[in-house]
Structures are given as C-alpha cells and as structure tokens.
C-alpha cells in the first residue's frame, strides 16, 4: 500500500522526487573545511570569496592569498561564483558551508533545466532516468558540493541551451536574451564553453535557418554580446597579471595545458576513458551509456545531443594537459551523457523477456552502480575530508596559533594554496626544490616573517619524498630555528 502511494507520487511529481534525492546525497559532510580531493582549486575559489568579503566586494578585482606583499589581484576566470558566496558571508559570516550550499543550489537548478530540456525531445521517462543518473553518479555528487564553480557552470550551460531552443521554437526575443546571459556567464567562468556550447547551438540554428543564419540579426547580436563580454573580461584579467604578476595560467601563465603532443599518446586517451568510465559513470553505467549511443534517432534535432557530446570531447583536446590532470574537466560530458543512458533505460526498463531479460539487467546495473558509486565516493573522496586525518589541516591550526594574522609567510607547498587558505594568512608559495637562501632573503626584504611547511607533504595531494629537498629545508632551519615542537612540520621565524 505504502509502495503504491510512493509510486503514484513519484509519477505525479517526478522532478520533486529527483530533487529530494539529489539534496539528500549532497548534504553529507556539508560542513567540511577545504581539504581533500582538488582542495587547491577550492582553496583559491574560497580565498577569493573571503577576500571579497574582507576587502570591499570589488567584483572586477579578485584577490588571491599567494600574492605576497602585493594586493593579490589575479588573472582568473570571472569570479561571479566567489562573489555570490561573499554576499552570503556578509549576512551569515564566513564559513565554507555557504560555498558548498551555493554549489548544491546550482546543481539542483542544472538538473531542473536538464529535465525541462530533455522533455523537449523525448518523453518524461527519458527525462526522469537522465536526471536520476545525474543526481546520483559519484563525481556529479562530489563536484556539486565542492567550493568551486563547476555546478554553476553546468547550470549556465544547460540553461543557456534550453532558452536558446525556446527562442527557436517561439521567436520570442526575451528567451534569446536569457540564453545570451547564461552562455556569456558560462564562457566567463571557463573558456571552453565557447566550444562545447557553441557547436550545439550552431547546429540547432543551422537546422532552422540554414544559410540564412549568416544574415540573421538576432544570431549576430547574440554572438556579438557573448564575444564582447568574453573579450572584455579576459583582457581586463590579463592587465591584472601584467600589473601584479598573479595568474591562474591563462594568457600570462604556463603553457603546460597546451602540450598537444600528449594527444598522440595512448596514456592520454586511456586515462581519460578509464577515469570517465570508472569515476564518472561508476563502471556499470558506462556500457549502458555506450549502448544508448546506438539507439536510433527519431528526428534531426535529436542529433543535437551527439554534437554536444562530441564538442565536449573536442574541448579536452584544446587543453589536453589540464584535462588529464583535472577530472572535473570531464563533468560537462555528463549533461548529454546521462541523456543517452536515460534513453536506454526508458526504452528497455520494462522489457522482460525469457531469452534476454534487459529490464533485469538494467535493474542489476543500476544497483551495482549505486554500490560502486557509493564506494568510490566514500573511499576516494569523503575519507580525505576527515580533519583528524588531514596533515594540512592540523598544520594550519598550528600556524594560526603561532603566526600573527598580519605576518607574511613563505609556504613550501608548491602551487597548492590549501595550507595558505586554511591558515588564513597571506604570503608566497614555493616548491622546496626552489627554496634557497637567496630566495628567502629576497622575500624577507619584501616583508616575509615566517617560513612554514611540512616534511610529510609538499602539495596537500603530494607526499614529500625527496630527501635532498628535506635536507635543503633542514639547512635553512639551522639558521632560522623551528619554533614548534613537531618533527613533521616547521614554522621558522625569519626575523
């Protein structure tokens, strides 16, 4: 009786059921500080939000903590996500909880728009299954509650596409204006949406207007608006780099992300495919995703999802090294990806035959995906967010106790700002291999008061195993003694 009532409610209000599931799985460990997987990306995002709150809410001048004695203005993506979180700080105080909640809200909105978008081309069954998988697959869950703009990016992506389709169907200009806003925000948050949103939209526009697409004033103004906002921001961001020297590695930074030779290696594609299958699709949904690709398209418009999928894969090739390092660069694949899974579930879920019981196979696959997804999420991700097991978190507490808040500090954590953020201090980041007496003296002249780091880790994700580098630090500590009684960490008073 109860099961029948639940089933009736789910069928009547499917999106509410999906949102409830999504919220439930995302609230776990919501109070976690910035530690764990990809904490360095989260730490920078959180630092910018905190600096907005502490230094005047200037949206166009994002500040990082590792700018030394400079204001820390940095060449970065448009910091709208951090700015939104900083507004919440103004009302509720500084806590990572509000960044995580912001991510969850954007994730729920992304799922809502995905449901509405999918129902334009398929029935509610396809939309339901697509969004159910979007709600529960492990990396979708993880990155929709991290302190970074990925969930906002996904929401703006699918919302921009949804309202563009509404414009094509109705010719109402306000839909096109809303789409332009969301697509512009997507391209400001990350550069790559120009490709993986632009190609699907081009396909849809071409399908309706054909050659007239090049003379359509609305398409022209739409494109011009997005390109102008994109160009203006990244030009301004680059000026910040030229003046202050801080960058996340765009036009003014390292070219490592553009090493295209890796595209010709087996390792690149095998690593990307394995990661996508294992982590993003929780193993058992990957073959169903592949099978969904072979379901016959009923209309030409439906090929839009194929274009979307291919364009995301092409975007990985644009920044191959970055795509290989950062698994969240594969997240945009999940938007069209779950739709192909949804198509297969909707078509075969109720198909029970004696010879080939596809419905039963799908049931088992779904259960196994939930099981493996839970294991991946718990072991590989949540376990690393335990503060009592985190060396970087423990060292940050020691730094807070021993270093005044206004003292500039050198942190030997390479490019990882996690310790810097958790300590709520400002200063410089240096790899132990680059730590010399000349380097230290140059920073002392700029106001450095302390040197802090660990003998157990360099970056929070990279163990410290180089004995020569450890000896180099010990040589430094012979001149600037360690002021804490801890054999695994050091805080040296430089003056």
Image (cartoon, rainbow, N blue to C red):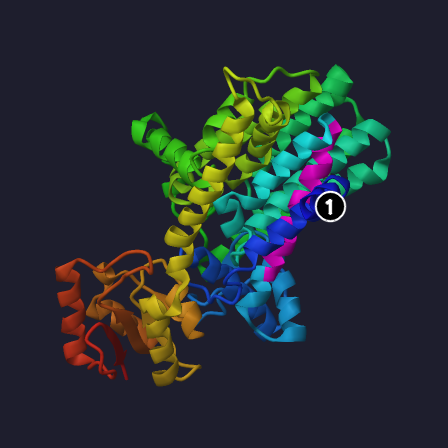
Report x, y in % for residue 162: 72, 36
Question: How many C-alpha atoms fall within 10 Å of the one at disc 1: few (<14), some, or many (≥20)?
Answer: few
Q: Does the magenta stretch include residue 422?
A: no
Q: Quadrant of residue 129?
A: top right
User: Can residue 440 be seen in the rendering of this structure?
Assistant: yes
Q: Residue at x 36, y 82 (%)?
A: 403
Towards the viewer: 476 or 138: 138
Towards the viewer: 354 or 273: 354
Is the C terminus in the top left, top right, bottom left or bottom right quadrant? bottom left
Which region shows up in magenta?
101-120
Q: In this view, does 447 lie above or below 16?
A: below
Q: Is residue 231 left or right of residue 162?
A: left
Q: In this view, does 52 lie above or below 143?
A: below
Report x, y in % for residue 196: 58, 33
Number of numbered discs? 1
Report x, y in % for residue 151: 58, 49
Q: In which quarter of the image is residue 485?
A: bottom left
Residue beneath label 1, please? 5
Mark 1, secondary structure of its residue = helix
Q: Which residue is drawn at 20% across and 70% down?
A: 437
Q: Is residue 293 above or below residue 137?
A: above
User: Can residue 214 be seen in the rendering of this structure?
Assistant: no
Q: Which residue is drawn at 65% across and 61% down?
A: 84
Q: Is residue 62 left or right of residue 419?
A: right
Q: Which residue is drawn at 54% across and 56% down?
A: 145
Q: Main secondary structure of the magenta part?
A: helix
Report x, y in % for residue 394: 34, 73
């Amino acid at each position: 009786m109860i099961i029948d009532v639940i089933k009736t409610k789910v069928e009547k209000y499917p999106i509410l059921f999906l949102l409830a599931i999504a919220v439930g799985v995302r609230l776990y460990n919501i109070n976690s500080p910035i530690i764990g997987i990809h904490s360095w990306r989260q730490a920078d995002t959180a630092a910018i939000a905190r600096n907005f709150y502490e230094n005047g809410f200037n949206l166009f001048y994002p500040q990082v903590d590792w700018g030394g004695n400079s204001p820390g203005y940095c060449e970065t993506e448009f910091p709208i996500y951090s700015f939104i979180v900083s507004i919440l700080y103004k009302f509720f105080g500084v806590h990572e909880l509000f960044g995580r909640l912001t991510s969850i809200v954007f994730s729920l909105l992304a799922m809502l728009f995905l449901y509405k978008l999918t129902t334009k081309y398929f029935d509610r069954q396809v939309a339901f299954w697509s969004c159910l998988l979007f709600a529960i697959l492990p990396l979708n869950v993880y990155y929709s509650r991290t302190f970074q703009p990925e969930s906002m990016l996904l929401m703006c992506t699918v919302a921009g596409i949804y309202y563009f389709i509404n414009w094509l169907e109705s010719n109402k200009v306000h839909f096109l204006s809303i789409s332009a806003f969301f697509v512009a925000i997507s391209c400001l948050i990350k550069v790559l949406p120009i490709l993986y949103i632009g190609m699907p939209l081009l396909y849809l526009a071409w399908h309706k207007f054909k050659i007239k697409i090049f003379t359509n004033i609305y398409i022209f103004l739409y494109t011009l608006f997005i390109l102008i906002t994109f160009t203006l921001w990244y030009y301004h961001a680059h000026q910040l780099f030229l003046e202050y020297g801080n960058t996340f590695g765009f036009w003014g930074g390292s070219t490592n992300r553009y090493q295209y030779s890796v595209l010709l290696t087996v390792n690149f594609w095998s690593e990307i495919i394995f990661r996508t299958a294992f982590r993003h699709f929780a193993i058992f949904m990957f073959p169903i995703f592949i099978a969904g690709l072979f379901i016959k398209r009923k209309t030409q418009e439906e090929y839009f999802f194929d274009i979307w999928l291919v364009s995301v894969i092409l975007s990985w090739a644009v920044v191959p090294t970055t795509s290989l390092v950062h698994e969240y660069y594969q997240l945009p694949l999940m938007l069209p990806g779950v739709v192909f899974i949804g198509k297969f579930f909707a078509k075969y879920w109720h198909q029970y035959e004696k010879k080939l019981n596809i419905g039963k196979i799908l049931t088992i696959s779904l259960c196994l995906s939930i099981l493996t997804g839970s294991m991946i999420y718990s072991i590989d991700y949540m376990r690393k967010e335990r503060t009592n097991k985190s060396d970087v978190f423990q060292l940050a507490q020691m730094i807070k106790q021993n270093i005044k808040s206004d003292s500039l500090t050198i942190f030997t954590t390479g490019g990882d700002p996690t310790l810097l953020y958790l300590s709520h201090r400002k200063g410089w980041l240096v790899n132990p291999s680059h730590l010399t007496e000349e380097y230290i003296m140059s920073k002392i002249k700029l106001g450095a008061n302390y040197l802090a780091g660990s003998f157990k880790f360099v970056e929070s994700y990279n163990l410290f195993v180089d004995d020569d580098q450890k000896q180099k630090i010990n040589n430094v500590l012979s001149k600037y003694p360690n002021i804490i009684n801890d054999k695994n960490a050091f805080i040296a008073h430089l003056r």
